[in-house]
Amino acid sequence: MDKSRRISIMILAGTIILFIISWIIKSNALQTSGMEGSLAIRDAFLITLAAFLTLAIFSFLYKDNPYYKFAEHLFVGVSAAYWMCVGFWSTFVGNFIPKVSTSLSEFFKVPPKGFEIHYFIPLILGIMLLMRLSSKAGWLSRWSLAFIVGTTAGLNLIRYLRTDFITQVSNTFVPLLVDWKGIGPFFSDFSLSASGQAVMTLANWVIFVGVFSGLIYFFFSKEHKGFFGGASRVGIWVLMVTFGASFGYTVMGRVSLLVGRLTFLFSDWLGLVN
Amino acid sequence: MNNIGIIISVVIIVLGLLWLAIRSLTGREVERRIIFLFMGLAVSLPLIFNITFSEKATPVVRNIFNKIESLPAGSRILISFDYGPSMAPEVEPMSNAFIRHSLAKGHKVILMGLWATGQSLSATAVQDIIKPEFPDKIDGVDYINIGYKAGNQGVLNVIITDFRKMYATDVNGVNLDSVAIFKGIKSLRDMDLMISVGGGFPGVKEWVLFAADPGNIPLAGGSAAVSAPTYYPYYPRQLIGLLGGIKGAAEYESEIKKHYPRFADMPTPGIKMMGPQTLAHLIVMAFIVIGNLSFFFAKRKKIDG
Amino acid sequence: MKRNIPVAITFIVGTVLILSVFFPPVERMGEDFSIFFDIIAVFAFFLGGGNLLRIHSDKIYRKQKDWGFSVVTVVGFCFMLAAGLFKLWNPGGIAADVAAPGSLFQLMYNWIFNPLGATMYALLAFYVASASYRAFRAKNIDATILLVASFIILLGRTPLGMYATGWIPESFSILQIPNMAIWIMVSPNLAGQRAIMIGIALGVVSMSLRLILGVERTYLGVDNE
Amino acid sequence: MTTARETIKEAYIGAGRVDAYNDDMVRYITDEQFGYVAAVDGIMVRERPATCFYLGAFFAESLILAETGNSIGAIQIAGTAMPTQLPFFVAACDYTLIGEELFAASAYLSGEPKQLGSLKGQDVGKFMAMVAILIGVFGATVSEAWGGSFFFWLTDTVRAIFTIQN
């Protein structure tokens, strides 16, 4: 047996021993906090398991290793099965079965809704979709794909046109002078409350110029030269501020996830903080 | 404890950053794992020392709070769980806060989800929040969990005209026609407020596109920080307010704590997470500054030499 | 047959859904199509599971590199599937919520699925840190604007911003960093996002039209016949 | 994978250098997100390319790729329509194609009429939006500052055109 193999077996043994120790300590801790015996042992096992899986993923930061690979592969399998099960019970049993069979409805204990033959359409299309798994009849899945694509396109077309195009354009009809009372009052109030007319005016200017020049930036039919070039330059600056905001928010979000996991390790598992 | 903790954490971090700055300005490589270690410390120290700050709600958050406050008791509020584990630490505090606030105000709460994981999350919310904290509220009368349906925007396109076509029962198989809370509800248009909690697809955006805007129904959002900025064009006309990331959750928690004495001792994961968050932001900014300084330093040296 | 029928299906379904917005008689049909879509979505999950199983059992069968980990995937998959489909340990039996508290399915969600998924994404915090140190450079005006704006947001979304600039009087409160952060979100960020949103909306509309009219057929794949 | 090989091969043929192409240049790594990143990182560090292009849909891996590219001193050019990943690419790469620029670039480079046509169509939409915004803002400003029924009417009319009721 070579050296690296020996080391990895030792690490594995160490991990298992640590796991068992943690399980025992955690069960005791849960029992002293008043939990019933068998339940405490079960929960202690689950918490320890979750903690070790968490650590297995974090071990990727050191380098790619078998523990990380184990955890990642487990995740892939579990998550696929999770979506399948929930989809099956909620939508297949909940929406399809009651429409096609009374006896099946009774078996699954869902209220039957009366027989409707056209509900076999999604069943047939669904089975055709599964044909994708076969190399010979795979082309049949195109029919179901066509249905999915058609529905998505039909649903999206009107809604995006209305909400993300038309309404966004009309929401940009902002007055460039808000509540004008003269130069003096204009410069006297730079607070962020709604009454600060200078701030409101400034905000409206930024929205107007920003949206307009941003659209110019994404306008490709005319070369970006002269006035057009200048406007698209302003457009890119506004977009950069936008990306800066996204950047800040993304950093914030990523950190939150880490805080969440460390909170679990420190409080739920190790009990260091309450 | 708070002060000593802050001092210890800041001293450790500042000393570390100084070391890093000197090292990188003199042109020596710093290994990636050391940077990782810094990040781990910046988050762990405030957690262990339990450092917290006070929060004040910003207008985009307060709008949601005021909306729930201003609705007459008994209004119908729908909360959709549109997230999974990848966002849970950020947005779970939000959904919990919305549920607490709505039930305390005496509203009727309907829980659902457009993500399959929403099925587990809403069940957890009922088990961990509603049952222990509101023992007088009755399932089917004051709240109901109707769970998840597959189909993303396809689901919204149905329930905006007819709830029962999509949802015949709640998660426990109870017929919606037999529960008190669903009397008089035909579609989403009968809701007084809808709240989507989540930040991916489907999420707040799909709720605006396929429910709030076509049905003209008030919608509030709780979003993971990553996608929160993209929802601002909808604010305030198509989206009455938005909690963006953990900061939004913390602000909302502080707002309900301020107005409801019964929540004085409630767990506030959002507020608790802001301590580590603050130090981590500082670290990231310091890294960017140090990295840029050493970059320009090295460039100048090259030009001079 | 292999191409024309799918194109026809897309056309009919898409058109019905568009018309259902404007004409009440078609509304019911539009609803039905939406429900069909939702049911087919479940089959897409089945397809996903089937595909996963096929790829990994193939790997195991051929003893490809790292096939042992494929066993982990398959075992995890089957275990979760059994827990969910048969509602194992579910206190309410078959009628109850599949994710009822105490059921094996919900336990596995809480203690395996959730920690794994959340930690995968938590790794990114570390990569953000190291990219901050080694990659984000203010090498031109654009990147500088981006980084300055992000600093204002990062400071403004923590109590630090208030501590640093809280002394600025109320009448100039926009200069306080938290307020600047708010202002960035509701003005330039809104403007930029709106320009992007309008562009994307036009893209979605044009793509949907091309799909419905059968101009765009790449989703049908390449014919090998 | 096969499609990718075909595309690259065609490009080499197009440039008249078919001899420089071999199938190993295009590799499939894995479909797991982080496994893929780790592998690409390794390749980048070992082979030290002079230029890295990142084009297409990226998720969280964008950041790790761009960081590695930076550390080996490569010129980096990115292009993606993923709004959440754009900031990282802009901050870390030398040049970034933002959103539709990516599609526009591909349309102009390929010169395919179908792609160009849809690009033109979208530009018409943008042009309409710009004109509407100019009129709407002008009307809103004038009616806010001086009142005047004509401008109220103008703004309302443009607004009405841009509102669908259903």
Image (spheres, rainbow, N blue to C red):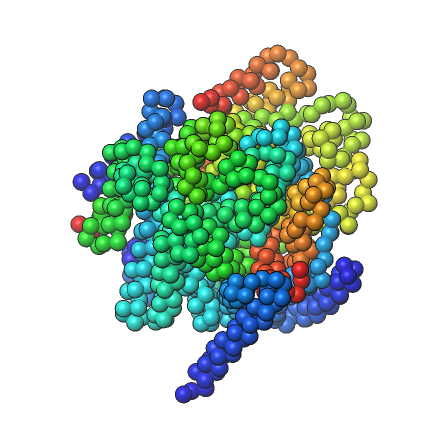
Tell me how many marks there are: 0
Residue A153 percent across, percent down from the top left: 36, 36
Quadrant position of residue B9: bottom right
Quadrant position of residue A71: bottom left
Q: Is residue A128 above or below residue B192?
A: below
Q: Is residue B125 left or right of residue B279?
A: left
Residue visible at 57% across and 44% down in the picture: B130
Seen as rendered, the residue at the extreme top is D149
Which residue is nearer to you in this view: C113 or C192?
A: C113
Residue visible at 45% across and 84% down in the picture: A6
The reply to whether residue A71 is in sight is yes
Residue D143 percent across, percent down from the top left: 64, 17
The reply to whether residue A146 is in sight is no
Residue B294 percent across, percent down from the top left: 66, 64
Q: Is residue B279 above or below residue B194?
A: below
Which residue is nearer to you in this view: A129 or A37?
A: A37
Which residue is nearer to you in this view: B299 or A119?
A: A119
Rendered-image quadrant of the C terminus of chain A? bottom right
Quadrant position of residue C208: top left
Which residue is nearer to you in this view: D60 or B49?
A: B49
Residue B259 percent across, percent down from the top left: 71, 39
Q: Is residue C199 left or right of residue B59?
A: left
Residue visible at 55% across and 59% down in the picture: C122
Q: Is residue A259 above or below residue B212?
A: below
Residue visible at 61% across and 34% down in the picture: B106
Rendered-image quadrant of the N terminus of chain A? bottom left
